[in-house]
């Protein structure tokens, strides 16, 4: 099983709509590791690490997010795996 990692910049109406809590719940359900945080520019940033199929499923779901979110776009880049033990919310930056 191949483990991959992706860096996501999620743009749109994604703060104040429980996007980070939703991301933690979905990532845990899919068995993924990494982190998610709000950014001062109004976007949400995440690193998602795990089996390729699960990471791709998370990214597909991230385009919808929680019910109140309105995702305009997600910028995705490959990043090296870091061996995160779990998926967690990080402080805003």
Image: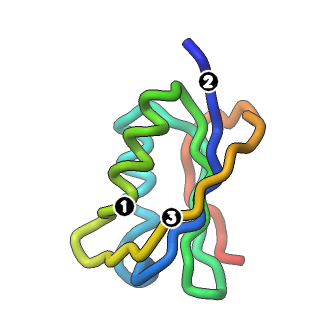
Residue 33, compared with residue 3, is above or below; it is below
Q: Position of residue 68 (x, y in %)?
A: 25, 78
> What residue sits right under mark 3 in the picture?
74
Give the mark, 1 or 3, whose residue is nearer the N terminus. Answer: 1
- Pick the front one: 48 or 92: 48
Rendered residue at 73%/34% (across/down): 81
Q: Which color scheme did the rendering employ for the protein?
A: rainbow
From the viewer's perspective, tell me whether residue 20 is left or right of residue 65. Answer: right
Of the pair 21 and 12, the residue shown nearer to us: 12
Q: Position of residue 71 (x, y in %)?
A: 38, 73
Q: Is residue 46 above or below residue 50?
A: below
Disc on res. 84: none
Badge 1 vs badge 3, beta-carbon distance below 8 Å = yes
Badge number at residue 3: 2
**Residue at (42, 56) in percent of width and height:** 23
Cα gap from disc 1 to disc 3, whole angstroms:
7 Å
Q: Residue at x 62, y 45 (%)?
A: 6
């Amino acid at each position: 099983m191949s483990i991959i990692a992706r860096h996501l910049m999620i743009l749109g109406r994604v703060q104040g709509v429980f996007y980070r809590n939703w991301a933690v719940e979905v990532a845990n359900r899919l068995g993924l590791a990494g982190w998610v945080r709000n950014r001062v520019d109004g976007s949400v940033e995440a690193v998602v690490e795990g089996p390729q199929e699960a990471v791709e499923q998370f990214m597909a779901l991230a385009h919808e997010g929680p019910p109140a979110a309105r995702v305009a776009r997600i910028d995705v880049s490959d990043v090296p795996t870091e061996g995160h033990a779990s998926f967690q919310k990080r402080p805003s930056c």
